[in-house]
Image (cartoon, rainbow, N blue to C red):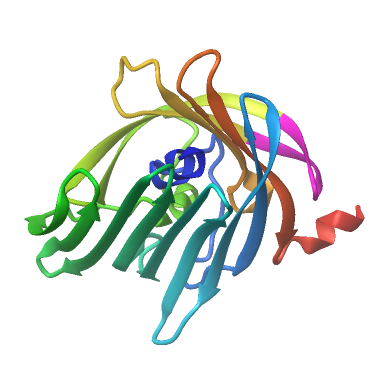
């Protein structure tokens, strides 16, 4: 479940600069990532895309389809005041003799979630619960970086709704690194996410401010010897021109 760990536990992305952004529109893209396990390359690929839909909605999807597992996350949302307002979120996973299917509807007046979850451990359950007004789903929180990060702060807390409950993520901005990518060398911001402040398990993300803080690399660390990594291998979108520089 390397891809599921890295993406579906994603906290809000972070950066050390403040940037000017257009609150009224997001730019569609498609990114392909290759997956490595403890530095060993695999043939598994992950695809992430953002598309504009009808009625001022957007559709963001992350998917992986391999012989080992199938993992899909989908969020349908509106972009309001430089923040995603989720309408529907789903996460399905099949692999390693385990299955999970979460379907979640978000409502905002008042803020609440109505979820139906199916898993090997708990069977099928339906639940409704209240959420804070700034709650994110665990996919579109990727888009929030440009709006919340400033030069004077390095630590953040983010609330997401996932399945039957709320989650708190602890985010720390580590610094900058330059990485080789299909778009050439990119300056990136490195951040770390932990579910518990003192946990040894963590997820590390490298985000490119030049690409509107798009994910370039991610690494989920279970231990010093066991970690999974995703690396950008292809890109289609408004920054294609960088391939020619």
Check residue 185 for magenta coloring. Answer: yes
- Name the chief secondary structure element in magenta: strand
**Which residue shows up at 46% across the image and 71% down it?**
59
Horizontally, residue 222 falls left or right of residue 77, namely right
Total numbered badges shown on the rendered structure: 0
Residue nearer the viewer, 109 or 182:
182
Which residue ends up furthest to the right in the rendered image? 244
Residue 23 in view here: no
Which stretch is magenta? 178-188
Residue at position x 59%, y 69% from top?
28
Locate residue 25 relative to residue 178 in the image: left or right.
left
Q: Residue furthest bottom?
A: 55
Q: Residue furthest front?
A: 97
Depth check: give the residue in front, 156 or 57.
57
- Taking the image as shown, residue 73 lies to the left or right of residue 124, namely right
- Residue 20 shown left or right of residue 78 in the figure: right
**Relative height, residue 31 to residue 217 (above, below):** below
Residue 176, x across and y down, in percent: 64, 28
Q: Quadrant of residue 152?
A: top left
Question: Quadrant of residue 51 in the image?
Answer: bottom right
Q: Percent x, y for residue 169? A: 31, 34
Q: Is 9 covered by the magenta stretch? A: no
* Viewer-nearest residue: 245 or 182: 182
Q: Position of residue 82 (x, y in %)?
A: 41, 61
Q: Residue 98 location in percent, x, y? A: 35, 46
Q: In this rendering, does residue 143 appear at all?
A: yes
Q: Residue at x 83, y 62 (%)?
A: 241
Residue at 8% over, 56% down: 129
Quarter of the image with the N terminus in it:
top left
């Amino acid at each position: 479940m390397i891809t599921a760990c890295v993406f579906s536990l994603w906290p809000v992305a972070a950066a050390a600069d403040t940037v000017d952004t257009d609150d009224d529109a997001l730019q569609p893209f498609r990114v392909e990532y290759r997956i490595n396990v403890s530095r060993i390359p695999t043939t598994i690929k992950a695809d992430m895309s953002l598309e504009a839909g009808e009625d001022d909605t957007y559709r963001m999807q992350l998917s992986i389809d391999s012989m080992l597992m199938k993992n899909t996350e989908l969020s349908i949302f509106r972009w309001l005041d430089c923040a995603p307002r989720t309408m529907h979120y789903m996460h399905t996973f099949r692999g390693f003799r385990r299955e999970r299917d979460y379907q979640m509807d978000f409502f905002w007046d008042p803020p609440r979630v109505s979820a139906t979850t199916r898993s090997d451990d708990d069977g099928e359950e339906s639940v409704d619960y209240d959420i804070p007004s700034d709650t994110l789903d665990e996919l579109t929180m990727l888009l929030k970086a440009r709006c919340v990060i400033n030069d004077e702060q390095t630590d953040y807390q983010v609330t997401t709704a996932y399945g039957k409950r709320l989650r708190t993520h602890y985010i720390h901005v580590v610094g900058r690194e330059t990485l080789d990518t299909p778009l050439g060398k990119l300056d990136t911001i490195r951040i770390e996410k932990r579910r518990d402040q003192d946990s040894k398990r963590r997820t590390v993300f490298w985000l490119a401010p030049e690409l509107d803080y798009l994910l370039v690399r991610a690494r989920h660390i279970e231990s010093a010897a066991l970690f999974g990594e995703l690396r950008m291998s292809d890109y289609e979108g408004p920054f294609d021109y960088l391939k020619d520089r």
